[in-house]
Image (cartoon, rainbow, N blue to C red):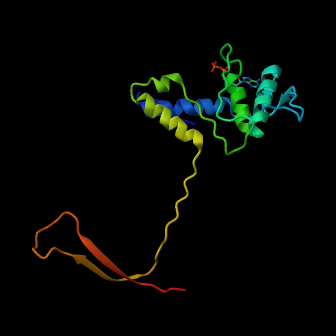
Amino acid sequence: MAMKITTGTSELRDITKMERIGVHSHIRGLGLDERLEPRETSQGLVGQAKARKAAGMILKMVQEGRIAGRAMLFAGPPSTGKTAIAMGMAQSLGPDVPFTIITASEVFSLSMSKTEALTQAFRRSIGVRIKEESEIIEGEVVEIQIDRSLTGVRTLSHRGTIGLECVIP
Ligand SMILES: Nc1ncnc2c1ncn2[C@@H]1O[C@H](COP(=O)(O)OP(=O)(O)OP(=O)(O)O)[C@@H](O)[C@H]1O
């Protein structure tokens, strides 16, 4: 796929997000058995047995509703699987649990305030589904009446009425 790289901030941000999704797209869970023991290779993860088991124990407490609103800190050298295990936890919690990545450089960006960056990340994380319902009235327009002021003075806003001939089932 061709990608255009310009100095525009939004385009650069999109590419970063796509790359991050790509490098972890093989992860579908923590790869644990029913006793929370890590399978050697499972759900896209391999090795890191102790870390996966520890993450699985926390995950079980979350699933059972025993902990909520807490944070986990993953520490370790670069590229050792911290993000991968966090992604595995989110995947195990199901499709309704969004995985949101936010980098320090986004929070300290010059183009956006810290509050705005954090607000956007929270909005992505809470995964609110907005359902909008609207009533549609179908019919044939039989009359259009625009109300004009009696003095003849033009105003910016006009009120009017549209008459519809409808068939009500
Ligand atoms: N145990 C694992 N099994 C399979 N793939 C893994 C495992 N650990 C890491 N990876 C993959 O290796 C790459 C680097 O891992 P990841 O980005 O999770 O490391 P990190 O510790 O979060 O790095 P950084 O500190 O630089 O952010 C990613 O593509 C990730 O999916």
Question: Which of the pair 97/15 is nearer the observer?
Answer: 97
In-image side of 111 versus 65 (left or right)? left
| Quadrant, the C terminus | bottom right
Name above or below for residue 102 compared with residue 123.
above
Residue name at image x 52 percent, y 64 percent: 133
Residue 13 at x, y percent in the picture: 49, 31
Q: Residue at x 77, y 34 (%)?
A: 61
The picture places residue 75, in percent across and down from the top left corner, at: 67, 16
Residue 65 vertical position relative to residue 156 in the rendered view, above or below: above
User: Can the viewer see residue 17?
Assistant: yes
Question: Is residue 4 at all visible to an observer of this figure?
Answer: no
Left or right of 167 in this view: 29: right
In the rendered view of the protein, which quadrant contains the N terminus? top right
Residue 99 placement: quadrant: top right
Q: Position of residue 101 (x, y in %)?
A: 59, 31
Front residue (pair 129, 14):
129
Residue 80 placement, left or right of 154: right
- Number of numbered tags placed on the structure image: 0
Which corner quadrant of the figure contains ligand 1?
top right
Task: Locate residue 50: give its quadrant.
Answer: top right
The residue furthest right is 35
Residue with the most extreme top position: 77
Residue 123 x %, y %:
53, 41
